[in-house]
Amino acid sequence: MRAIQITELSGPDDALKLVDVPEPEASTMLTPGSGVLVEVHAAGVSFPEVLQTRGEYQVKPPLPFVPGSEVGGVVRSAPDNAPVSAGDRVAAFCGLGGFADVVAAPEFFCFTLPDELDFAQGASLVLNYHTAYFALRMRGRLAEGETVLVQGAAGGVGTASLQVAKGLGAAKTIAVVSTADKERVAREAGADEVVRTDGPWKDEVKELSGGGVDVVIDPVGGDRFTDNLRSLREGGRAVVVGFTGGSIPEVRVNRLLLNNIEVVGAGWGAGVMSKPQAVREIGDAITDLIAKGFVRPLVGARFPLERAAEALKLIDAREATGKVVLELD
Ligand SMILES: NC(=O)c1ccc[n+]([C@@H]2O[C@H](COP(=O)([O-])OP(=O)(O)OC[C@H]3O[C@@H](n4cnc5c(N)ncnc54)[C@H](OP(=O)(O)O)[C@@H]3O)[C@@H](O)[C@H]2O)c1
């Protein structure tokens, strides 16, 4: 079968090679000796794959390996105990191996893809939307009627967080973005208000939220983190999701007691990878939000498999919006 491998750790320009490799066995790292084989129609591309081309991601498989953590496709075979069966359209999280014609995924990480969503949207569903739900509800304890600030709001996690927050009953969502094009994407994802990083966004957020927000979702980090804390109302929670901005912020903890606020970590992988029941619970919640019309992944750019490097470079250049996907024949 065709696959894209990372063959060296030299960055997205040179690290990727299109190769012909044997199809995988129905076995995964999380479920040795068992798994669902999926014929891949679309593979999601995310920040971790960019980092993997440089050896900078926490998961460092031996070279060469096939990256790609999630796919949309059709089940070729599934064990009897799986929630999906041969012929089903699915969204699946495979961890690695998704940039290929066929991939094996753990049974508990396969979800029937509703008719409303195409394969590219299926390849956009697990990593970002499960993370958004985990961060907002399970870690940020978002309650109905609360206000949510989303950093990096035109990105994959950002657009997902805007939609999931509304689905969970947020009264208002405020998006933070860096460009006019990203402002358009954040609005398309359903943001009630959008502020720009090149303006006085903290003051605007205070005003738009009537004194402060209840929850901040932050996949960006860097030097805007202190202003995240200043944007919270009393009892607010700032949820740490990622560091695309490049640096890991430090918190002066006196800020936490001054206004009784919290900084909460949300590591979706660490939180659910060994808990199939939690994965199914989140999957059910997302399926419900799709049925109610809140969740509609925004696919920003589509590339054929052999142009995977361009997909990674788009993310690396901070030009991606929504989800970037590879489409296979
Ligand atoms: N904690 C978890 O469980 C979990 C799960 C999934 C993903 N993540 C992490 O969350 C982060 C976001 O992922 P994503 O898929 O949403 O990424 P993405 O689609 O590329 O969006 C990231 C956003 O970060 C902002 N940004 C600021 N400085 C940047 C820079 N120097 N380079 C690139 N982007 C920059 C950009 O927004 P502006 O230009 O508008 O500022 C961009 O839209 C990643 O670090 C990823 O590893 C964490």
Image (spheres, rainbow, N blue to C red):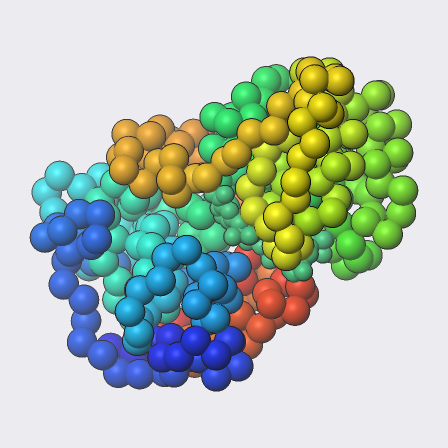
Residue that appears at 32% across and 41% down: 273
Please indicate whether residue 1 sits to the left or right of residue 190 in the image: left
Residue that appears at 27% across and 37% down: 274
Quadrant of res 173 = top right
Percent from the top left, x then y, of residue 123?
43, 55
Residue 273 placement, left or right of 323: left
Q: Quadrant of residue 210?
A: top right
Does the rendering let one see residue 212? Answer: yes
User: Could one spot residue 75 in this view of the protein?
Assistant: no
The x, y position of residue 63, in whole percent, is 31, 74
The residue located at (47%, 75%) in the rendering is 308
Left or right, residue 5 beside residue 304: left
Residue 32 in the image, given as x and y percentages of width and height: 13, 51
Residue 181 image offset from top left, x and y in percent:
77, 59
- Quadrant containing the C terminus is bottom left
**In the picture shown, does residue 291 fall above or below 236?**
below
The residue lying at 37 percent from left, 57 percent from top is 59
Q: Is residue 80 above or below residue 142?
A: below
Q: Of residues 328 and 244, which is closer to you in this image?
A: 244
Q: How many marks?
A: 0
Instruction: Point out the image quarter for the N terminus.
Output: bottom left
Question: Between 193 and 263, which is closer to the camera in this rendering?
Answer: 263
Q: Quadrant of residue 191?
A: top right
Closer to the camera in the image, 280 or 255 = 255
User: 130 or 206: nearer the eye?
Assistant: 206
